[in-house]
Image (spheres, rainbow, N blue to C red):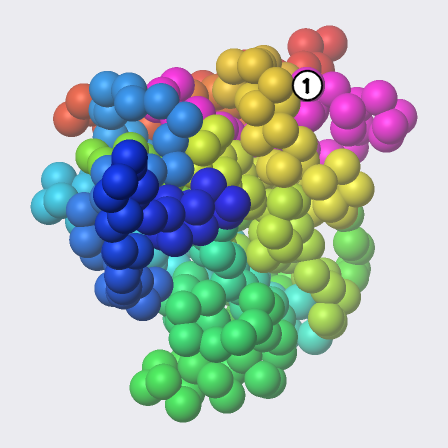
Amino acid sequence: MKRRKFIQNASLTGIGVVAGAAAISCKDEKNSEEVASSSSNSPAMIAVTPVVIATWNVPTSTAKAWEVLQEGKSALEAIEQGCMVEEANAEGQSVGIGGLPDRDGNVTLDACIMNKHGNYGAVVCMQNIVHPISVARKVMEDTPHVILAGKGAEQYAVSLGFKRENLLTESSKKAWEEWRKTSLYKPIINIENHDTIGMLAIDKYGDISGGCTTSGLSYKMAGRVGDSAIIGSGLFIDNEIGGATATGLGEEVLKTVGSFLIVELMRQGRSPQEACEEAIGRIIKKTPDFKDFQVGYIAVNKAGETGAYCIHQGFTMMQYQNDKNENIAVDFYNKT
C-alpha cells in the first residue's frame, strides 16, 4: 500500500527543474476488474499462463471460467461465472439449488469471493437465493461491509433484483426425510464426491481471484457456519503471492486458518504443493481423530504453478490450462 501511494503521489524533480504532481484518478472497483491490468502488484514481471483450478469434478464450471478468461475478462469475472454454473445445478446436492438442508429442512448457503486487491465479500446462512457467489460479489463491491448473514443477506439480494426461489428440490427433500428417521449426525468422508466448490483463477494479466460456495454440511444445526465464507479459512488471495481454497470439514479448516496458512507458506518460498501438504500436516498433528473426516486444499502461485493435498483418498481437483480441462486425483496423507 505504501508503494502504491508513493507512486500515485510522487512528483518528478531534477536539477533546476520542478515538475508538478501528476493527478491520477482511480476508477471504482467494479469497473477496474473489467479493465486490463499490468499486474502492478506483482513483484516481478513473469510470463503468464492463465489457469483455472477448482475443488472436485466440476468440468462445466471450470470450462465456463476458462471461456470467460479467453474473452479477455478478469479472473474475478471468471470466478463468479464459473461458480454460478454449479450453483444452478439442481442435481448436485452441495451447492446452490438442490443443496442438502439443515436438520430443520432449510437450505442455507454460504459463499465468498476475493479479488486481486485483497477486497472480499461474503454471505452466510442465506436462504432462497440461487447464486450466493453473486451476492457476495455485490457485498464486496457495493457495500461498506465484508459479510452479510441470514435474513439480512437475503433482503439485500432481493433489493438488488435477485429472485427468491425454493432451493429444496424433491430429491434433497426425500434425502432429508430419510435422514430424519434416525437423525444421526456424522460428517461422511467425500459424501456426494464433493461438498464445496472452491475456485482459483489467474487471468492473462497475471491477476488472481478466488471464490468459494457451498450449502454446508448436510443436516447441520440451524445457524451453523463453516469455513467456506470465512476469509483466511475457506479462501485467501494475495495477488503478489498466490491463492488457496479449502473443502471438507470446515470446523477443522477454521481451527488452522488453512488457506491463509498456505499463502503465507508460499510467501516463504514453499511451492503450492509443499504448502498444501504442510497445511494438512497441521490438522493431522492437532487432531488425533483425523480418520473420521476429510479436508482438502488446492493452491496456485503467481507463476501459475498449482498444488493440492488432502487427508483421505477420493478428493480430486479440476485444472483448466493450455486449453486442457482435467480432473486430477489428489495425493493424500492417510495411506493405511
Mark 1 closeness class: few <14, some 14–19, many ≥20 residues within 10 Å? some
Q: Pick whichever, 218 or 68, lies toward us.
A: 68
Q: Is residue 333 at all visible to an observer of this figure? A: yes
Relative image position of residue 38 (x, y in whole percent): 24, 38
At horizontal 46% and vertical 66% (from top left) the residue drawn is 140
Classify the position of the C terminus by image quarter.
top right
What is the span of residues highlighted in magenta in the rendered image?
A: 278-305
Q: Pick whichever, 171 or 150, lies toward us.
A: 150
Relative image position of residue 207 (x, y in whole percent): 32, 39
At horizontal 51% and vertical 45% (from top left) the residue drawn is 2
- In this rendering, position of residue 208 left or right of residue 51: right
What amino acid is found at the position of numbered circle 1 in the picture?
Answer: Glu
Relative image position of residue 254 (x, y in whole percent): 73, 45
- Secondary structure under the numbered disc 1 in the rendered image: helix
Q: In the displayed structure, would residue 162 be above or below residue 217? A: below
Q: In the displayed structure, would residue 121 be above or below residue 40? A: below
